[in-house]
Each structure stands twice: as structure tokens, then as C-alpha cells.
Image: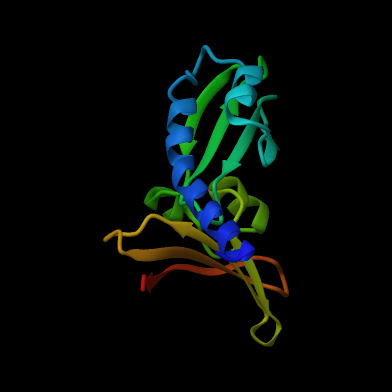
Amino acid sequence: MKPRSFIAAALAALSTLLPGCDQAALQDIRPGVTRAAEVQQRMGDPQYEFRNDDGGFTWEYSRQPSGVHCYMIRFGADKIVQSVDQVLTEANYARIQPGMDGDAVRRILGRPARVERFDNLREEVWEWRIEGIPHNEETYLNVFFDTGNGLVKKAGKRVAMRG
């Protein structure tokens, strides 16, 4: 096996293990009990930290680009977990509306798997890999931003059949 092929195969195998690792770590994170230091010990460093208006904060744990989950763990000002949510859901996709800015979208869905810019269309497209039904399809959520004003133009799903 060529070194590149081996690395690709190893990364693919690792990505299938992440959901199991997440579930093991997440089952021990309890709202009202678990402290930020314990979450960091179990989940690692967050990819992003959002500051909340109430003095608390939210940590983002995105499993993009290979995974189909993004966990947002919200803490109070006392650094104790208030909630744990997997945010790549139908309910959250429906919250993405024309006129929203990128910060608002990131706060709802987390870091996208991919960002592409199409200067000729004056668009920037953010893409998340999401759970598809049936499971033999790769499904993606795309959010289209107007590069002139940086606001959402539209959002929709894209399905790619697996070979």
C-alpha cells in the first residue's frame, strides 16, 4: 500500500471511531454537575469558544469534515455545563434564514466542513456533511452567502450517491 493510501485509509478508519468515542465521553457530561475542566479532559480543546450574553460560554466540538456531528456544550458563568447539544439537526437547518450573517450561522451549526467562493456568482458557499437517509447517500447542507454584503441568500441540501 502506498504511503498516501495508507494515511487515507487510517484517517477513514479513525473517523468511524469518533462517534463511539464521543458517545463514551458525552455520557459522563451531565448538565448542572460537570465542570469545564472535566469536559476539556474528556473531549479535548474546543475548536471554538462563543461568549454568551449571560456571562457564560459555549464550546464547539465539530466533527467536520469527515463526521456528521457538531456538539455545542453550553456553560454558565460558574463554568458548569448547562446543556450538551448535537446541533446538526433538521430543526437547526430550518433556523437558517436569508439575511443572517456568518457569525449567526456558525453559532447555530458550528464550523462548516468546507467553504468555497464563486466570484462570478458573488457567492460564498459553506457546506456541512450531515446525516443522510437512506444511509447509502452522502448528504450535505449548503448555505449560500452574498459576497457583497456577507448575508445568507439561501440554504439547501445536496445529496451525492455513494459509489
Residue 99, image x, y percentages = 59, 63
Q: Judge whether 102 appears above or below 22 on screen.
A: below
Q: Of all residues shown, which one is farthest toward the front?
A: 1
Q: Of all residues shown, which one is farthest toward the left?
A: 134
Q: Looking at the image, which is closer to me, 64 or 125? A: 64
Image point (36%, 74%), residue name: 163
Quarter of the N terminus within the rendering: bottom right
Q: Describe residue 92's horizontal placement relative to residue 74 as left or right.
A: left
> What colouring style does the render use?
rainbow
Please tell me in which quadrant of the rendered image residue 52 appears. Answer: top right
Q: Of all residues shown, which one is farthest toward the top?
A: 33
Tag count: 0
Image point (66%, 14%), residue name: 78
Q: Looking at the image, which is closer to me, 135 or 16? A: 16
Residue 59, image x, y percentages = 63, 34
Q: Judge whether 145 appears above or below 41 on screen.
A: below
Please tell me in which quadrant of the rendered image residue 112 appears. Answer: bottom right
Residue 22, image x, y percentages = 48, 34
Image point (55%, 53%), residue name: 11
Q: Judge whether 151 appears above or below 74 on screen.
A: below
Q: Of all residues shown, which one is farthest toward the bottom?
A: 120
Residue 142, image x, y percentages = 51, 66
Image point (41%, 49%), residue name: 89
Q: Looking at the image, which is closer to me, 154 or 112? A: 112
Q: Describe residue 55's horizontal placement relative to residue 157 as left or right.
A: right
Please tell me in which quadrant of the rendered image residue 124 appears. Answer: bottom right
